[in-house]
Image (cartoon, rainbow, N blue to C red):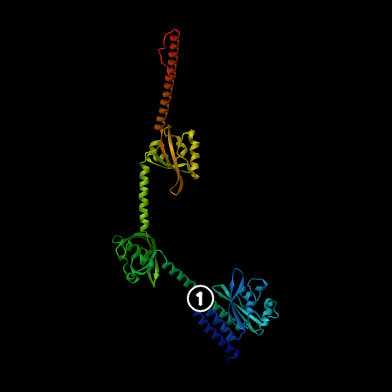
């Protein structure tokens, strides 16, 4: 025959089952905590119950929900779960040890001394704390207060710990659901606000397309959903795109693909699309991120044209053009090969000092350092050295550049040997003219003096001067 205790235990176990079902069916933190705390108050008749969560950085226990006669108690106390005096009560001990902790008589147990005064004001005489553990992680505790001493027997502790465990699992599930909803919101926000078109292809048809995609293809959502994807692709690129989709479906992903798409009005747009396999409405599908690269294509084309013009300019320049990085020659045009007498394989990688006459070697290296520092220097004249050892005069203009991702010096080298030769010849000619002029002037001066002497003798002889001299 069942005793009253047996009947009461069965009743409480049934209540535990009902509450567990109810809190398992909800994803609301408040509902889970309310139903759990109310059941403890109503079924067991305890005076007050509260739920606290942990704060790992500070070891504080934060009250988040309470039922029963609390009367400002929680605001007047501080509880921790470390091994300080504020962590040695039933709450801190239960959290720290992950097992129920009971204090059967607050007045006689020194562990409860920090909170005894406030507890006595409200008639709390004993209490028990139950850790809330989910997946071996402590979330907090359920803390139960009674107006009777020794109010917690073994069956009661067992039932309340089971309720705490179920509550912890329900709160953990609610937390995961909340995180999932937040992720979904962020995901949808990312998709809808993306500057790129983002769509989903299911059975080679458009199943979803964001607003950027609608603007790109110039369709309304009703017009494009369900449309065969091949209708949006340039005819010459359709096989390539459909094959790309098949590869993604079979392998999960594939490298981004460049191709042409068609808008509603037939305009051709170059795009780059990244695809990956996903599950959509329970079926394998392909998610696409489509980027309009029309402007990039134009820039690339313009850049390529500029590069071609620059390459043509360099290769057809009457001057040698080269680049030096870390003291070594990393580029030189055909005119430079002709000027120095090396093949390309011989000169690329050569130390630049080997192409400079010893008398100018130090000056050349110093000027390179100056340009690398960012300073500008005017064209300089040097003597360089050919492969056969012959020196020749040049004028070099330098600038700092980026070459294949490295800082380098670009040099335009003009052979001025002929100019120097002409300059030297001109200087020699001018010197000879100056000598001839001086000789002529001296001869003229001597003739003047001779004429003066003749005139003087004639006067002494009583005759007239025959030379008219202008001073």
| In-front residue for pair 13/119 | 119
Above or below, 405 relative to 285: above
Reply above or below: 333 against 255.
Answer: above
Quadrant placement of the N terminus: bottom right
Quarter of the figure with residue 52: bottom right
Q: Quadrant of residue 101?
A: bottom right
- The quarter in which the C terminus is drawn is top left
Give the residue number, with chain letter if any, for mark 1.
174
Residue 206 image-quadrant placement: bottom left
Residue occupying image coordinates x 41% and y 34%: 416
Disc 1 packing (10 Å; few <14; some 14–19; many ≥20): some
Q: Is residue 90 visible?
A: no
Q: Residue furthest bottom?
A: 1
The number of discs equals 1
Q: Helix or strand or loop: what does disc 1 sit on?
A: helix
Q: Position of residue 153 (x, y in %)?
A: 63, 83
Left or right of 338? Residue 116 is right
| 365 left or right of 90 in image | left
Q: Residue at x 43, y 8 (%)?
A: 462
Q: Residue at x 44, y 21 (%)?
A: 438
């Amino acid at each position: 025959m069942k005793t009253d205790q047996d009947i009461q235990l069965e009743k409480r176990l049934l209540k535990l089952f009902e509450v567990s079902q109810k809190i398992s069916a909800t994803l609301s933190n408040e509902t889970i905590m309310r139903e759990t705390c109310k059941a403890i108050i109503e079924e067991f008749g305890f005076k007050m119950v509260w739920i606290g969560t942990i704060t790992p950085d500070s070891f504080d226990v934060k009250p988040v929900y309470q039922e029963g006669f609390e009367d400002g108690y929680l605001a007047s106390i501080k509880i921790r779960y470390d091994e300080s005096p504020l962590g040695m009560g039933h709450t801190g001990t239960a959290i720290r040890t992950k097992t129920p902790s009971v204090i059967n008589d607050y007045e006689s147990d020194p562990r409860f001394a920090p909170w005894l005064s406030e507890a006595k004001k409200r008639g709390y005489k004993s209490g028990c704390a139950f850790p809330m553990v989910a997946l071996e992680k402590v979330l907090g505790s359920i803390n139960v207060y009674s107006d009777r001493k020794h109010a917690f027997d073994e069956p009661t502790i067992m039932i309340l710990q089971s309720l705490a465990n179920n509550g912890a699992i329900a709160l953990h599930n609610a937390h995961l659901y909340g995180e999932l909803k937040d992720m979904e919101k962020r995901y949808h926000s990312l998709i809808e606000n993306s500057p790129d078109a983002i769509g989903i292809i299911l059975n080679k048809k458009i199943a979803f397309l964001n607003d950027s995609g609608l603007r790109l293809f110039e369709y309304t959502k009703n017009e494009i959903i369900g449309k065969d994807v091949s209708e949006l692709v340039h005819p010459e690129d359709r096989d390539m795109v459909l094959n790309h989709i098949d590869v993604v479906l079979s392998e999960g992903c594939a490298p981004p693909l460049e191709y042409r798409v068609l808008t509603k009005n037939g305009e051709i747009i170059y795009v780059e699309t990244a695809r990956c396999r996903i599950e959509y409405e329970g079926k394998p599908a392909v998610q696409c991120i489509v980027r309009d690269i029309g402007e990039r294509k134009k820039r690339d084309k313009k850049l390529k044209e500029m590069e071609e013009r620059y390459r043509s300019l360099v290769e057809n320049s009457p001057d040698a053009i080269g680049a030096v990085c870390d003291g070594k020659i990393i580029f030189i045009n055909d005119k430079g090969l002709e000027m120095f007498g090396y093949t390309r394989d011989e000169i690329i990688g050569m130390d630049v000092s080997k192409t400079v006459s010893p008398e100018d070697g130090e000056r050349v290296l110093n000027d390179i350092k100056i340009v690398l520092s960012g300073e500008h220097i005017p064209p300089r004249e040097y003597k360089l050295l050919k492969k056969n050892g012959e020196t020749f005069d040049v004028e070099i203009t330098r600038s700092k550049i980026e070459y294949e991702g490295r800082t380098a010096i670009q040099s335009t080298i003009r052979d001025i040997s002929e100019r120097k030769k002409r300059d030297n010849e001109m200087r020699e000619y001018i010197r000879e003219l100056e000598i001839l002029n001086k000789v002529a002037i001296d001869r003229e001066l001597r003739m003047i003096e001779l004429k003066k002497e003749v005139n003087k003798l004639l006067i002494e002889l009583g005759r007239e001067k025959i030379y008219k001299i202008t001073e």
